[in-house]
């Protein structure tokens, strides 16, 4: 019997087991214990038994229990410190009573972006396909489509819908600019899409202390003049503010896809990276993530790449074109030594693109070489022991989807869950896992029936007007091309060999061959892995319900079971676990309690030896040897200094 809780800055997740099927159990009541306030709240119910009034206010999981072994607390407040109590409920619908098992009490978690003194991970609430967003847009009496109404709201700084959808992600995009302004530092950015008024305002205040390699995004289409630079007005705006802007215009079939920022103040100090473009849509209308890493070694590596981007642009100023020269590609292909994070919480394998000898052929063929960054990613995936959880936009083929399908076939007990924007990617996984053939599925054409999908890897969708029932109404699923814009793979999040893969890289061959990209492979950092796992499972779980609704129609909705048969999908007749999901939770153990630190918005756990070195602030995640970490950090730092000196000598 145990309960495991984990969280990030936006959502708390709790899972539990009671060792086997509980005869007579009709589900679980879930209580949130506020550690600081000393209060206990039963979480609201989301489903009812037959013949009960689902609209009745105040229904909780003590009335209508959860008939599964995993739940998300969407009502937990940011900054809160919580435990969860799981109570098995028996009796009859309408007259439930706690059973004589348990309760199970979880570890303590805190909803914070800070995963220790070095790494902070931010996630938004950019899922548009929700009933709350549908009703908010319905309440807007202005003319226009739901997408038009959304665009109006998310472009206005301070609009309640914008604030709700972007969560704390704007904090990630602006914090290093603000620090540079207040402390006399500078920032070095490499950006793709560039439009959000709030993010631009913070960067503009730096004037000539802001240095930006700014790529172009071709735009326009039917009924609209085509342009090679969608964000030309913003480019002019930031130049007018005094920023040092290096235009990096890309040839057709290539994109300057980076979205990172380095803070420099007496040397590189911190770096922002992740999937988030500097646009209102990225903040509010797509799922995205960002990391602020206060690691001089990691920041120095990004700054070195920034200088290579500048040197590879001709001319390195206004109107510059990207060369993606052989020298530039070779430097990116040279694997950096692992970068040890200074608090001992983990280490990072860092890759930059393009990192192949040449751009991708129009018709690559079966002998196409695996890019070096993806070779490492595929190897990590192949060695997964417990779980692979991922989110992707449109990875193309080959990509991580192929590698994950191979890993699932080789190890059927793996817990695999993924959500993507592109239906073709989900269809590709289905084809690979079901053995329907070696070739990718035919590209989906307008009017075709839906591509077959496996429930483990699904594409994002909303409730349509044809799906709507009862009080549910049609949802807006997307405002633009991307829905899920994250590029995340999490492997074995509850182990000390956990891995988080994130950055701007779309996790397929094209990104490595053709684009300016960055990819961070973060090893052994338990707090970060659990935060990313919470985000991935949150997004997957949201779209899983809509997947079942879209594939099974009215069969997707059903009331709570009035007996204990709901457990049969988890346990065999001889009471053996038969569910990969439950096996995953059985093997899950959180890093440890996340206790409030003196600054009241961080997290830590008891590890006296390491905490003594970091003044009590380190989360001490993963396997640690302080001496080994110090040596690794010194080697990494020395290597970067030598590389920088060599580059300057060459110049």
Image: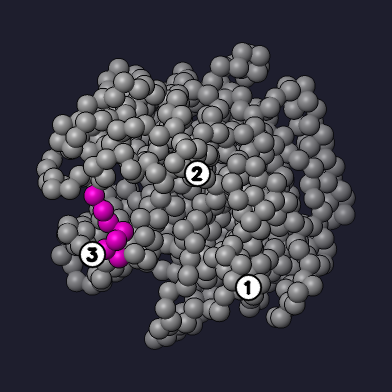
Sequence order check, earlier mark of 3 and 2? 3
Q: Nearer the viewer, mark 1 or mark 3?
A: 1
Secondary structure found at label 3: loop
Distance between mark 1 and mark 2 Cα atoms: 27 Å
Q: Residue at x 46, y 79 (%)?
A: 220
Secondary structure found at label 1: loop
Measured as percent of width and height from the top left, residue 644 is found at 81, 46
Residue at numbered disc 3? 468
Residue at numbered disc 2? 578
Q: Is residue 462 visible?
A: no
Query: Residue 311 or 244: which is nearer the viewer?
Result: 311
Question: Which quadrant of the figure has residue 480?
Answer: bottom left
Distance between mark 3 and mark 2 Cα atoms: 33 Å
Measured as percent of width and height from the top left, residue 314 is found at 72, 69
69 left or right, relative to 351: left
- Say few, some or many: other residues with alpha carbon within 10 Å of mark 2 (under 14 / 14 to 19 / 20 or more): some
Query: Residue 28 or 34: which is nearer the viewer?
Result: 28
Which color mode does the image show?
A: one colour
518 left or right, relative to 561: right
Measured as percent of width and height from the top left, residue 446 is found at 43, 82
Secondary structure found at label 2: loop
Q: Which span of residues is magenta-colored?
A: 553-559
Measured as percent of width and height from the top left, residue 508 is found at 64, 63
In the rendered image, the residue lying farthest to the bottom is 223
Q: Is residue 389 visible?
A: yes
Q: Any magenta on residue 17? A: no
Q: Residue at x 56, y 55 (%)?
A: 487
Sequence order check, earlier mark of 1 and 3? 1
Residue at numbered disc 1? 437
Distance between mark 1 and mark 3 Cα atoms: 35 Å
Query: Residue 391 or 70: which is nearer the viewer?
Result: 70
In this rendering, is residue 635 above or below 35? below
């Amino acid at each position: 019997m145990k309960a495991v809780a984990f969280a990030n800055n936006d959502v708390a997740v709790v899972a539990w087991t009671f060792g086997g099927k509980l005869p007579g159990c009709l589900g679980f009541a879930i209580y949130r214990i506020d550690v600081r306030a000393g209060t206990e709240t039963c979480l609201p119910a989301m489903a009812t038994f037959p013949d009960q009034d689902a609209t009745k206010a105040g229904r909780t999981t003590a009335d209508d229990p959860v008939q599964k072994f995993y739940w998300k607390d969407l009502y937990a407040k940011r900054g809160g410190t919580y435990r969860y109590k799981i109570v098995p409920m028996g009796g009859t619908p309408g007259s439930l009573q706690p059973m004589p098992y348990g309760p199970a009490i979880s570890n303590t978690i805190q909803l914070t972006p800070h995963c220790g003194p070095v790494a902070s991970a931010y996630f938004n609430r950019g899922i548009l396909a929700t009933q709350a967003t549908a009703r908010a847009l319905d309440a807007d009496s202005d003319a226009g489509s739901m997408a038009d109404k959304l665009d109006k709201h998310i472009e206005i700084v301070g609009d309640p819908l914008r604030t709700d959808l972007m969560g704390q992600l704007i904090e990630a995009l602006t914090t290093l600019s603000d620090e540079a302004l207040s402390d006399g530092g500078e920032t070095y950015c490499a950006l793709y899409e560039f439009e959000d008024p709030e993010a631009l305002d913070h960067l503009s205040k730096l004037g000539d202390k802001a240095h930006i390699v700014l790529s172009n995004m071709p735009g326009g289409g039917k009924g609209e003049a085509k342009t090679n630079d969608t964000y030309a007005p913003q480019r002019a705006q930031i130049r007018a503010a005094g920023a040092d802007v290096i235009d990096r215009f890309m040839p057709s079939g290539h994109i300057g896809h980076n979205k990172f920022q380095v803070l420099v103040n007496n040397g590189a100090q911190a770096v922002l990276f992740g999937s988030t473009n500097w646009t209102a849509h990225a903040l509010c209308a797509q799922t995205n993530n960002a990391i602020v890493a206060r690691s001089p070694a990691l920041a120095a590596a990004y700054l070195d790449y920034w200088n290579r981007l500048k040197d590879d642009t001709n001319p390195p100023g206004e109107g510059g074109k990207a060369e993606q020269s052989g020298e530039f590609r070779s430097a990116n292909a040279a694997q950096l030594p692992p970068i040890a994070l200074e608090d001992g919480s983990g280490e990072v394998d860092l890759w930059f693109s393009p990192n192949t000898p040449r751009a991708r052929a129009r018709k690559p063929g079966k002998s196409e070489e695996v890019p070096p960054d993806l070779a490492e990613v595929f190897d990590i995936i192949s060695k997964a022991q417990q779980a692979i959880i991922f989110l992707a936009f449109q990875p193309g083929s080959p990509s991580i989807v192929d590698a994950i399908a191979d890993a699932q076939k080789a190890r059927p007990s793996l817990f695999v869950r993924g959500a993507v924007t592109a239906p073709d990617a989900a269809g590709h996984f289905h084809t690979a896992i079901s053995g329907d053939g070696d070739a990718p599925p035919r590209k989906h054409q307008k009017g075709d029936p839906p591509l077959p999908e496996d429930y483990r890897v699904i594409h994002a969708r909303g409730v349509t007007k044809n799906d709507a029932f009862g009080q549910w109404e049609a949802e807006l699923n997307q405002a633009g091309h991307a829905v899920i814009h994250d590029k995340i793979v999490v492997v074995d999040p509850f182990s000390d060999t956990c891995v988080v893969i994130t950055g701007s890289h779309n996790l397929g061959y094209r990104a490595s061959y053709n684009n300016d990209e960055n990819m961070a492979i973060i090893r052994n950092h338990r707090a970060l892995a659990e935060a990313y796992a919470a985000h991935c499972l949150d997004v997957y779980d949201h779209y899983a319900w809509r997947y079942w609704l879209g594939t099974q129609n009215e069969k997707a909705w059903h009331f709570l079971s009035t007996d204990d048969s709901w457990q049969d999908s988890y346990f065999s007749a001889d009471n053996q676990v038969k569910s990969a999901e439950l096996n995953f939770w059985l093997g899950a153990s959180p890093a440890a309690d996340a206790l409030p630190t003196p600054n009241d918005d961080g997290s830590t756990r008891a590890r006296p030896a390491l905490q003594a070195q970091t003044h009590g602030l380190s989360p001490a995640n993963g396997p640690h040897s302080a001496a080994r970490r110090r040596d690794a950090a010194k080697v990494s730092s020395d290597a970067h200094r030598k590389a920088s000196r060599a580059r300057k000598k060459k110049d």
